[in-house]
Amino acid sequence: MDARTNDGWANRLGPTARTIAIILAVVLGVFAIGMVGGFSYALIEDGQLPTKPQVYLIFAAMIGLVVASGWVLLSLFRSIQSAGMSRFDRRYWKMWLVIFALSMPIGAAVAVLGLSDQRDGLTLILSNAPIAPLAAILVSVAMTMLLVMAAVIYHRTIDDHEEHAYLWGSTIGYYFLVLAFPLHWLLARGGLVPQITIGIALLIILASCVVQAIAWAMLKFR
């Protein structure tokens, strides 16, 4: 497809759908980049080519996902430019590009750490498996610094309406955590769900982020 075809489907999306599509494309792209990096790191560490064909299929699928995410993002940003943007809109979308660019190395680093052992694969990301102390310190420091930078850039760019949506979304996400962790603890005590681990806690926190994002989007685009 040529650029005009790409811009055509992107231009048919409304502002809400376009924003959601950009966020999803970036999240999937970061995940795929991390997976490719993780497989590559595991291959270098093991020193041997994998024997299972599924490994090559997953690797090829992740490369395809990276390419597809890039194509979608390029099409969406071209449609935004062609529609004409105000000064605030240009600053707003530059802000999101900077934030997503800051998040990519952290996502890749976490994926590399989680996929560094081919025997367990993705299960390491959601487990209590140990990692090198230096790696844990470096990633923790980088994650903290980038989160602070992203938060400052975001709140200096958005308007009062979006900040209101963000704060209410964050409050709803917090209430989700306040409810989810005690419920899981009670159900685990009853033998209905597994005991909480670092991986399960991470999933609950990620779920709260999804809840926060949904509430934010509903309030921002209402």
Image (cartoon, rainbow, N blue to C red):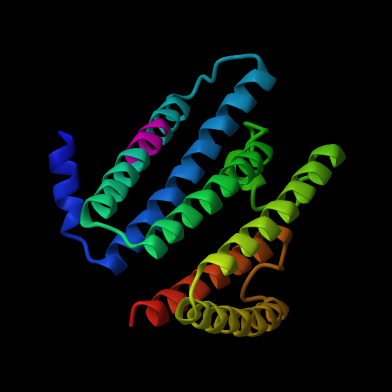
Main secondary structure of the magenta stretch: helix
Tell me the quadrant of the picture where the C terminus can be found.
Answer: bottom left
Residue 80 in the image, given as x and y percentages of width and height = 28, 54
- Judged left or right of residue 49, residue 120 is right
The quadrant in which residue 107 appears is top right
Residue, far front: 87
Depth order, front residue of 206/68: 68
Residue, far right: 133
The quadrant in which residue 170 appears is bottom right
Q: Is residue 64 magenta?
A: yes
Stretch of the chain drawn in magenta: 63-68
Residue 108 in the image, given as x and y percentages of width and height = 59, 40
Tell me the quadrant of the picture where the N terminus can be found.
Answer: top left
Count every numbered label the image shows and give the total: 0
- Judged left or right of residue 61, residue 171 is right
Depth order, front residue of 119/111: 111
Depth order, front residue of 142/122: 142
Residue 173 in the image, given as x and y percentages of width and height = 57, 78
Q: Is residue 20 magenta?
A: no
The vertical placement of 160 against 53, above or below, is: below
Residue 29 in the image, given as x and y percentages of width and height = 44, 43
Depth order, front residue of 52/154: 154
- Judged left or right of residue 139, residue 53 is left
Residue positioned 66% across, 67% down in the render = 194
